[in-house]
Amino acid sequence: MRSILEEEVAVELQHVNVKLLLENPEDLNLDAVITVFHSWIQDQVCEELLLDVADYRHVHHGPGVVLIGHEADYAIDNTDGRLGIRYNRKAPLEGSNQDRLAQAVRAVLAAAERLHQDTRLNGKLHFNSQGFEIFVNDRLLAPNVAETRHALEAEFHDFLGVLFGGIEYSLKFESDPRRLFGAKIRTAEPIAVSDLRLNLAVGESSSYDIV
Amino acid sequence: MKSSNSFWKEKLAEQMPEHLAREIDIFETEITLRKQGKLEERLFAETRLRRGAYGQRYDNGQRSDGQKVQKLNFSSGDLTKGPNTMWDAPGMQRIKVPGGGLNAAQLEVMAELAEEYSDGIAHVTTRQDFQLHYVHIDDAPALMRRLATADITTREACGNSVRNVTACPYAGVCTDEAFDVTPYAQALAKFLLGHPDCQSFGRKFKPAFSGCAQHACGLTGLHDLGLIAKSRVNEVTGREELGFEMYVGGGLGAVPYQAKLFDSFVPPDELLPLAQAIARVFARHGEKKNRNRARIKFLIQDLGIEKFRELVREERKILPFDPRWTEYIREARAEFAEGPLKPAVNVPELVLINSANGSGPELQKWLKFNTRPQRQPGFVTVTVALPLGDITANQLRSLADIVRRFTRETIRTTVEQNFVIRWVSKGDLPELYKALHAVGLGDAGAGALVDITSCPGTDTCKLGISSSRGLAAELRRRVSEKSFTSDQAIQNLHIKISGCFNSCGQHHVADLGFYGVSRKIAGYAVPHFQVVLGGQWEQNAGSYGLPVVAVPSKNIPIVVSRLTERYLADRTNGETFKDFVMRTGKAQLKVLLEDLTKPPAGDRSFFSDWGDPREYTLGDLGDGECAGEVVSALDFGLAAAERELFEAQLAHEKGEVEVAGRSAYHAMVTAAKALVQIENADVGNNPDQIVQEFRTRYYDTQLFFDPFAGGKFANYLFDAHRKTGQQYTSESSRYLIDEAQLFIDAAHSCSNRLGTLVSA
């Protein structure tokens, strides 16, 4: 059996993280988010088994408020001082890299929609319609080196092309090799959560064309 | 759970110290055996605890969501990793850091692990360890391998073992220490790690070192084994001699015990053998069945310190000589020697403040609270104050950069859940402050009122009763300004919070200590904290506080402001808070707080805890794992034999018949040794001796005989031993594996007949 270290072919994307940046983050009351996340556990509203809420608001530019799940975590994350809704896939997934990217984005979009509609947050939690981050939380599968970027750049562009439905975007890969492999993405014009979900659905129906 | 888990072993094969690699391989095999139902859950629980893999709240598969108790349907089904502990439930991984000493690469590894296996946060504990939470047990071996490449082990971080050896973080640079205790702490940690004499304790055993008697940094008074550096002049030679004042039997918990003086002067060469003798006496005489009385403090209480001392001295006399007693200290002296990266620069504080563009007042506060002169002129230590002991992965990487830039990577964790950077040239302070401040690590107030210590409490601990971290975060927010503007007497007070009476937050030694309790009010459980006042942090945790009254959690901030205000108003000239508490007395203090003991009528907020909107319940309490599972050395020996046999089977499947045959034979020897050790703990590892002693003690006496098969299974061992050196074939190794299985089964039966299994 060839080891993964000898593989020169495609990088297997697992443990995909996606973050949607928030509009007017200073307006958001994270106390209310804690209450909302607890209610998500009560109602088990997600596909993942939800377990607990961890509060790290006291930490500078930290993970914020995390809804701990078994297969994935959701968070209102403030890493790098960029407050956003983050989905952190922990359990491995079957399927292609495009499938796994789509799964993570679908999950974070569903969370964004649910949070936006929650009256306890007074409509103050909403996606800024342009800022995204995608990264891979596994340094062995996707070390932050040029080879990984080389292997995944096309995958990212294929996926983002479908997700944004042709809207232009800029993409900047993480340059610090010690940090996770990933990219910060900004669309040239705003795009609504509902449109992103629609684009994904369209993309899925013609997924064989994408890969 | 991570897709990459199985690949790390291959990737890191050449980068791990061999002994750590082997240790992790064994644990991985045990995980496989447990999944196959071949290792009983109680044994697996203790073996994972001894690798620092701890349980966490809700791991029994249920959680109160504020309205009902929810069953958590993990995909692993009924598989458990210990009694009443679901396999898939997230757990806590504790990581030992002897003496708190780290380098930049280790900080970076910690960052990676926090990010990839936990929730992005590394938590520094009150015993200088790290803890990662929400870790899946399947990820533990990969996590451990990555730590091992940085020369860090999790071995014996939990369970009934020798826990992290802590030491004063200022050791070697402190202005009033007798000498640097670092190499001695490191040598003791290395010597006792995995030591056969430390494998059958009834409870944990915590050692600590301090460079002086007067400060708090080592907290030797509350440890099972406390060592304080001391120098004296030899009356005969007139020369200065270095040694240790040795204390034993301290501990916190529900009822705190002050350590007792064991020896007023232990020479360095006697340190390791004496600790070994103490471990033997504890293992032999300590309580095993009643875990509530199994710490060494109870043994010493029952025996009396004189009798305990006598037993240890007798044991010391018969200890077989071990060259490591002195070798390890000699090696550690070389390995842990430190020095500066940059030359000393002595700059007056005013010049430093003026040189900081625009950050003068902030820098001034930081200089006051977070820096401390070293005994080496021109150098200072800098404390990085962590809120609630938490640090992010990005901050850890930044900290690694900072310690590389300003020092020779000299940084240590502290028992106040902070970091201390050592060997900073004083002239670098403004730049260092700027670098820390840029990544949110430049908060002033280290060691002051705002620098609150807290255990994890109900956030993650199965034993937590009240939210210690929630309260700590709230108090931190409220007192942050007070910390800098109030009277100096208030600024220097210590607040420490535990989620329950087990005292992981060290509330007994705080000026203002709190531990979680619950009370029923109008038929509802209400989270409370017991107020403990006047503990002494200095003098190595010199005395313990006075429990005064239990107050609802939501009223604790008022308790703090009321007590500090009263102290400020009433204190006599220079009176410490501890003395104020003693003078005022419990009765008066209780009167002062009496109106706060009941929630205001109709205020429902008192029925939930800080930072947690759920209606409060005690229903989430689980079985604690602090005590570990009481598993005898015999149990462990037989489990090790099973594992070796499993490895033999795997080797046979791969066609490695020589390895298979040798492993099967060795599995029998291991099982035999486990039985022999009941009568002779010093049997050693020589198969000839083990087999001979097994024959004498178990075959000749017929103790090993099966009621039906007689001595048949013992003969499998004797035959295999006689044939060692012969080549194995596929067939002969296959037979040997079967025979080894029967021999090990017979060893279990023998153990049961002897009644030597210790029931938990």
Image (tube, grey):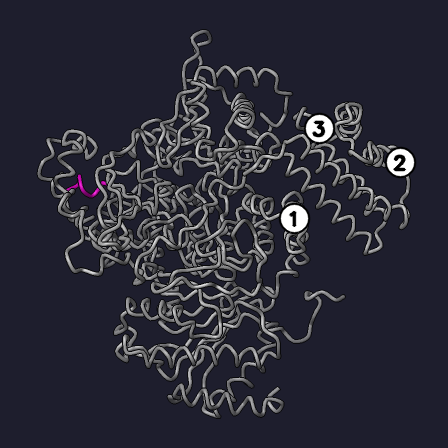
Chain under disc 2? B
Q: From this view, report whether residue B33 is shown above or below residue B71.
A: above
Give the residue displayed 46% in from the left and 25% down from the top: B299
Magenta region, residue range: B487-493
Q: Residue at x 30, y 36 (%)?
A: B509
Residue B165 x, y percent position in the rendering: 48, 36
**Nearer the N terminus, badge 1 or badge 3?**
1
Residue positioned 16% across, 32% down in the render: B580
Q: Label 1 vs label 3: CA separation?
A: 22 Å
Q: Is residue B75 above or below residue B731?
A: below
From this viewpoint, which residue is outermost toward the top? B236
Q: Is residue B492 in the magenta section?
A: yes
Q: Nearer the viewer, residue B274 or B176?
A: B274
Position of B307 with respect to B715 (left or right) is: left
Same chain under badges 2 and 3? The reply is yes
Is residue B144 visible in the rendered image? The answer is yes
- Which residue type carries mark 1? Leu
- Alpha carbon distance from label 1 to label 2: 30 Å
Determine crowd level at label 1: few under 14, some 14-19, many 20+ residues with C-alpha closer than 10 A. some
Q: Secondary structure at mark 2?
A: loop
Location of the C terminus of chain B (image quadrant) = top right
Estimate how packed mark 2 is, as few (under 14), some (14 to 19) or many (20 or more) residues with alpha carbons within 10 Å. few
- Point out which mark residue B39 bears: 1
Q: What is the number of the mark on residue B723?
A: 2
The residue type indicated by label 2 comes to Lys
Residue type at tag 3: Val
Q: Position of residue B558 (x, y in %)?
A: 17, 50
In the depicted view, which residue is nearer to us: A67 or A203?
Answer: A67
